[in-house]
Amino acid sequence: MANRLAQEIEKILSGVVGDFIARATLKKNCELIGKTTDTIEPTDLPLLAEKIEKSVSFFSGKEVGTEVSRMIREIAP
């Protein structure tokens, strides 16, 4: 995965759900917004954060999902 944004998001997710689930979650949610892990851009972060929040909240609870979403939105371009 060459995209710096994808690497940072995966790192955030890995701390919460583990490496394997982090990669799968990122990949699937990128697809949901019409992107890949190689093509996401800073302008995609708000929508991607929203989608990932829902996924993480389902498995890890609303508080965790909200925090992950906040961290993703704050990634500097």
Image (cartoon, grey):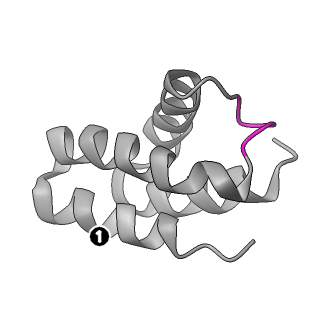
Relative to 58, say whether 73 is above or below: below
For the residue labelled by badge 1, is the local secondary structure a helix, a strand or a loop? helix
Residue 3 x, y percent position in the rendering? 82, 49
Q: Which residue is labeled 1 in the image?
A: 67
Residue 22 x, y percent position in the rendering? 48, 43
Is the stretch drawn in magenta largely helix, strand or loop? loop
Quarter of the picture containing the C terminus is bottom right
From the viewer's perspective, is 4 left or right of 49?
A: right
User: In this view, which residue lies farthest toward the right?
Assistant: 2
Quarter of the picture containing the N terminus is top right
Q: Residue at x 68, y 77 (%)?
A: 76
Residue 49 x, y percent position in the rendering? 44, 52
Q: Residues within 10 Å of mark 1 (few under 14, many from 20)?
A: some
Q: Residue at x 49, y 23 (%)?
A: 32
Q: Residue at x 16, y 38 (%)?
A: 58
Task: Find the magenta span and give its range.
Answer: 36-40
Residue 47 x, y percent position in the rendering? 47, 46
From the viewer's perspective, is 76 left or right of 16?
A: right
Relative to 1, say whether 30 is above or below: above
